[in-house]
Amino acid sequence: MTSHCPPIALPPDDGLRITLHNEVHARPPARIRLPALVVYVAVLNEGISREVEWAHLRELPGQAALTLEQLSGNFLRLRFATHTLKWERHTEFTRYSIVQALPDAALSGCPEDELIGSLVIAPAWLASIPGRTVAAVMMAMVHGDVDDQPAMNALAGPWFEGRDVLASLMGIRRSCVMTDFRLRDSGFERLLVVSPTNTSEMRAGRLSQRLLELETYRLMALRGLPIAKELGPILSEAESHLAGITARMESAEASDQDLLTTLIGLAARIERATATHMYRFSATQAYHGLVEQRIEQIRETPYPGTQTIGDFLQRRVSPAMATVQATAQRLTSLSQRIERASALLRTRVDIATESQNQMLLEKLTKGQDLQLRLQSTVEGLSIAAIAYYVVSLILYTGKSAKAFGLPVNPEMLTGALIPLVLAGVWWGTRRIHKKLHDTTH
């Protein structure tokens, strides 16, 4: 059988075309068959290479043949007999999601250590995941009737250990998600998702993905809050310092050099803070946008008797995001004000320098005038001296001619030629000045 290659009907592909086209398939949701338990861990991967994560994944049973190339696309799903494991690497964090059958005792109030022991992945493997934990969730997903509140309470009570919960109905098919946003001794928080019996595996997978992303992005967004609180007193001190520098600039007695040195030190501190923390502030805004997007995507409606998860998050996250945004704007504004103060100081220095240059120019002009006058005086004396030497030569010439017997009166000849000599020397000097002037111009 002969294979036929399709004819080439397009220009050569851009180098990024395949990568960008396949990005839409980069992180497909899992297919989850209920009832299921989703164990989710997100760790910060700063300083953790892909090779280190690859070596850790190879420690799983049957994965010794896993190649590094399989991790090149930032997404990998490993299928086992009784569960699946999904690995996803992002810019700042890496996520591990294990989907397994829900243990029989999970919703009957079993102790935390017993639940951890029933996981299909060894707890030691989870504890040795490279990185620092930023989010960890155990999400039980079961079938149920969300309109039957007594049955819903019976499910939620043991899972959340009798604590008060938040709940939301999601989407048109009315699945229900519950959580108490509390960390257990194991480090995990818990979610409970109850869906109708006709919920497809794909819908359950999409719902799981959105809820886990919502929690991860919430925590990543809040990472900018401690930095904003830490920068608050520093920015207040810098603003006060800048106000003092500006007040000193109003005084003509303040040393420009001292002001410039102080302002440069302040500018360096603010620029260092900007370079160090502005990325985190920008990332916080981006993560917050993703949180709002995920809240919108789950299309939640209130569950009777409880506050919705979206409302709860917005009430707690929004003030933190406002603090981060205000600190970022404050940092940018302070940098701009320092730049304006620097411009004012440069203007002040330029004016002072111009005044000094003007005074120096006036002194040079006066010196040039004196030099010109002195030069004119010297030139007059030079004309007289040259004329004297020429007249002396004429006198000696006349005396020599008389000594040879020529009828010449040396004194009368010299006296008669003095005016001509003076005129000739003056004319010659003027010609020399004119040539020098033409040459320099």
Image (tube, grey):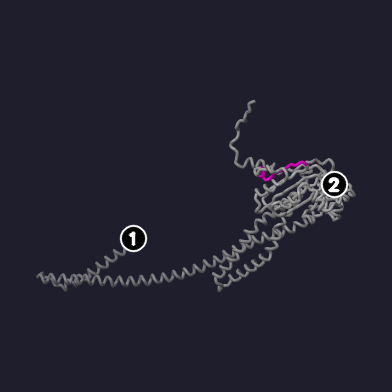
Q: Quadrant of residue 435?
A: bottom left
Determine which residue is flagged by label 2. Answer: 104
The foreground one among 195 and 85 is 85
Quadrant into which the C terminus falls: bottom left
Count residues near mark 1 (Cα–Cα under 10 Å), then give few for <14, some for 14-19, many for 20+. Answer: few
Q: Position of residue 275 (x, y in %)?
A: 62, 58
Q: Please state if 63 lies on the left or on the right of 381 as rendered.
A: right
Residue depicted at x 83% and y 40%: 198
Earlier in the chain: of badge 1 and badge 2, it is: 2
The residue at 71%/60% (across/down) is 226
Answer above or below: position of 437 versus 150. below
Please state which amino acid type lies under the numbered disc 1.
Thr
* The label number, if any, that marks residue 329 in the structure image: none
- Judge by depth and name the residue closer to the eye, 120 or 377: 120
Q: Position of residue 107 (x, y in %)?
A: 85, 49
Magenta stretch: includes residue 64: no
Q: Is residue 76 magenta?
A: yes
Q: Position of residue 337 (x, y in %)?
A: 62, 63
